[in-house]
Image (cartoon, rainbow, N blue to C red):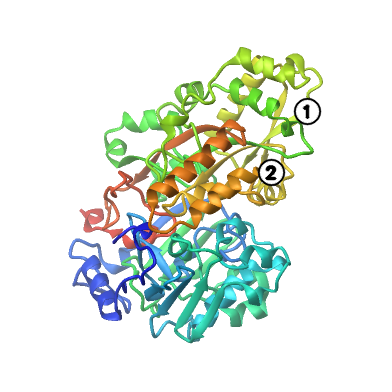
């Protein structure tokens, strides 16, 4: 499939028909061993009753993406169907929509829904459900936590700010099976954003409110799985949805999601309690665990290492903090030795980051930024003195805030703490916050100093660059940066120009020290040898992962092979 930038101002070629969807599913899953109503098991698969996947992770508050992205329980994609999904190469594939078109002016995308979609209570899924979902996300009453992500949709951000009613958000049901999304300017990545519009059931949400997704009785599904159980603090169980008629039906009959923190995963894997260790938001496998694994004959065969499009950085508070002074930000940037962090703490699990865009990502060229901000303790001391805090004297007391950190990230924070003490004479505390509390306070720009990542949602520089547009996740604001990013976002058909503008914006972000960029992870996952399937191979970016991409079909396109019984 062509990249979106090459589509220019012509209508997009129809992606498939209903018949083609059936053919695609059959080709992907084989022809023998009927499972449920949709999926056939491949010849090398274990029996249907053994198609069970066990995973572990932290507990979220909602299964409803439209309520909260940062506090959601993994994962919304199991129980609901977005308009489109991304394949392993981050290219769009049919999901709820069997085809889509782009208007001649590039502003309106029209999605044609497949017939026969139903919620698990038998209620038809219609275009109006997608309208309801997006309006809920835009409503200021909902306090949605990643408004900037959807800001290219006409009036989405304005509705969230209370400036226009949600009825003016750029989405419309043309009929029961046709939904149109309009953007404020041509937006080549709108299709990718649409893969993260996870539809919800209006007739349930209007009655149950925010808690609709917390109970199997009210958590209706139109996706490949249904919620069977949510035992708070213990586990969630998802079972194959027999009413699902889409192209992403799964060979798996159930997925059990055990609740546990990062430190519990490796022992659980060794004990045979789970089938894989996912990478999560952070690296789950510690450097010490990695050394042990690489020395074990069985575990080393089950270890998979791959780059991932994620960047970690230090971010600062706004005008009411000492970080409003660029000299202070520069001092912090020159006082942190990212190469030492990579070599001593992260030990082979990362490479140094020089900018916002990860190596290999859309529009990225990090090597050009390598010498813009270097480790220089003497320069750092001078900059802090120029800001009025010689040797750290009189500098306000701040904590470095972490979001539910893994042990490795805690160690990184401690190393940064030591560097700031040694090189600047500044005492910085460390505070770990629960994910929901951290998210709420950070989005409100209440945290003066944070260590945080951004992970790719879709393969386009807008996904990263939008984080630092004014009003986004962090307090730093720069009008020239905003202008460059918005101009790049609206260019269709000239990827070279888009990359040039994004890189100009990134230069501003780095030189103005909107953040101190630290590392890009090299992720590691473990999965049992009896797990197999079409997704367990490297994509064209060299990434081999159960989570490539973020909004793709993840776990449920793979299956348990009969090797488990051999």
Q: Nearer the viewer, residue 242 or 229?
A: 242
The label on residue 397 is 1
* Residue 538 percent across, percent down from the top left: 28, 47
Q: Residue at x 70, y 71 (%)?
A: 164
Label 2: which secondary element: loop
* Residue 19 percent across, percent down from the top left: 26, 80
The residue that label 2 is drawn on is: 475
- Give the mark, 2 or 1, whose residue is nearer the N terminus: 1
Q: Residue at x 29, y 50 (%)?
A: 539
Q: Decide: few, some or many residues near mark 2? Use Cα within 10 Å; few <14, some 14-19, many ≥20.
A: many
Above or below, 347 relative to 465: above
* Residue 513 percent across, percent down from the top left: 61, 32
Above or below, 106 relative to 469: below
Left or right, 134 with respect to 538, comes to right
Q: Nearer the viewer, residue 236 or 537?
A: 537
Q: Nearer the viewer, residue 183 or 389?
A: 183
Q: Residue at x 26, y 50 (%)?
A: 537
Left or right, 557 with respect to 426, comes to left
Above or below, 138 relative to 534: below
Q: Is residue 439 at least partly visible in the picture?
A: yes
Left or right, 38 with respect to 376, comes to left
Q: Decide: few, some or many residues near mark 1? Use Cα within 10 Å; few <14, some 14-19, many ≥20.
A: few
* Residue 519 percent across, percent down from the top left: 48, 33
Can you tell which quarter of the image residue 402 is in?
top right
Furthest residue in direction top, as rendered: 378
The label on residue 309 is none
């Amino acid at each position: 499939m062509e990249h979106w930038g090459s589509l220019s101002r012509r209508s997009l070629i129809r992606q498939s028909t209903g018949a083609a969807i059936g053919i695609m599913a059959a080709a992907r899953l084989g022809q023998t061993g009927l499972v449920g109503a949709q999926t056939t098991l491949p010849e090398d698969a274990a029996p249907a009753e053994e198609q069970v996947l066990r995973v572990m992770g932290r507990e979220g508050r909602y299964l409803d993406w439209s309520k909260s992205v940062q506090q959601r329980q993994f994962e919304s994609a199991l129980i609901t169907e977005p308009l489109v999904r991304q394949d392993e190469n981050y290219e769009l594939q049919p999901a709820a929509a069997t085809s889509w078109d782009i208007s001649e002016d590039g502003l309106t995308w029209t999605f044609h829904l497949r017939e026969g979609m139903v919620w698990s209570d038998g209620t038809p899924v219609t275009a109006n459900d997608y309208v309801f979902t997006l309006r809920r996300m835009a409503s200021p009453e909902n306090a949605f936590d990643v408004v900037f992500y959807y800001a290219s949709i006409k009036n989405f951000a304005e509705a969230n700010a209370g400036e226009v009613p949600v009825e003016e958000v750029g989405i419309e049901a043309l009929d029961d099976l046709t939904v149109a999304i309009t953007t404020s300017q041509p937006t080549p990545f709108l299709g990718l954003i649409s893969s993260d519009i996870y539809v919800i059931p209006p007739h349930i949400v209007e009655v149950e409110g925010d808690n609709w997704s917390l109970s199997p009785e009210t958590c209706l599904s139109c996706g490949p799985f249904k919620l069977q159980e949510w035992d708070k603090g213990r586990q969630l169980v998802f079972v194959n949805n027999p009413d699902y008629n889409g192209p992403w039906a799964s060979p798996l009959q159930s997925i059990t999601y055990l609740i546990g923190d990062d430190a519990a995963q490796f022992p659980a894997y060794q004990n045979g309690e789970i089938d894989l260790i996912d990478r999560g938001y952070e690296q789950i496998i510690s450097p010490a665990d990695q050394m042990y694994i690489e020395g074990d004959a069985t575990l080393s065969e089950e270890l998979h290492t791959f780059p991932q499009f994620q960047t970690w950085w230090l971010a600062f508070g706004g005008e009411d903090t000492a970080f409003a002074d660029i000299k202070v930000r520069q001092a912090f940037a020159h006082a942190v030795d990212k190469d030492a962090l990579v070599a001593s703490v992260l030990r082979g699990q990362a490479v140094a980051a020089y900018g916002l865009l990860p190596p290999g990502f859309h529009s990225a060229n990090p090597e050009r930024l390598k010498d813009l901000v270097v480790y220089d303790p003497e320069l750092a001391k001078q900059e802090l003195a120029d800001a009025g805090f010689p040797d750290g004297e009189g500098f306000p007391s701040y904590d470095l805030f972490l979001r539910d950190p893994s042990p490795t990230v805690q160690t990184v924070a401690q190393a940064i703490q030591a560097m700031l003490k040694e090189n600047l004479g500044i005492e910085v505390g460390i505070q770990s916050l629960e994910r929901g509390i951290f998210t709420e306070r950070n989005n409100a720009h209440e945290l003066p100093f944070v260590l945080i990542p951004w992970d790719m949602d879709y393969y386009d520089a807008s996904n990263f660059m939008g984080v630092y547009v004014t009003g986004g996740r962090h307090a730093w604001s720069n009008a020239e940066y905003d202008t460059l990013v918005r101009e790049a976002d609206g260019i269709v058909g000239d990827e070279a120009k888009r990359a040039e503008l994004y890189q100009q914006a990134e230069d501003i972000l780095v030189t103005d020290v909107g953040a101190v960029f630290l590392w890009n992870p090299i992720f590691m996952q473990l999965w049992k040898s009896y797990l197999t399937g079409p997704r367990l191979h490297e994509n064209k970016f060299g990434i081999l992962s159960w989570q490539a991409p973020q909004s793709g079909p993840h776990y449920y396109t793979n299956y348990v092979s009969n090797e488990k019984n051999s």
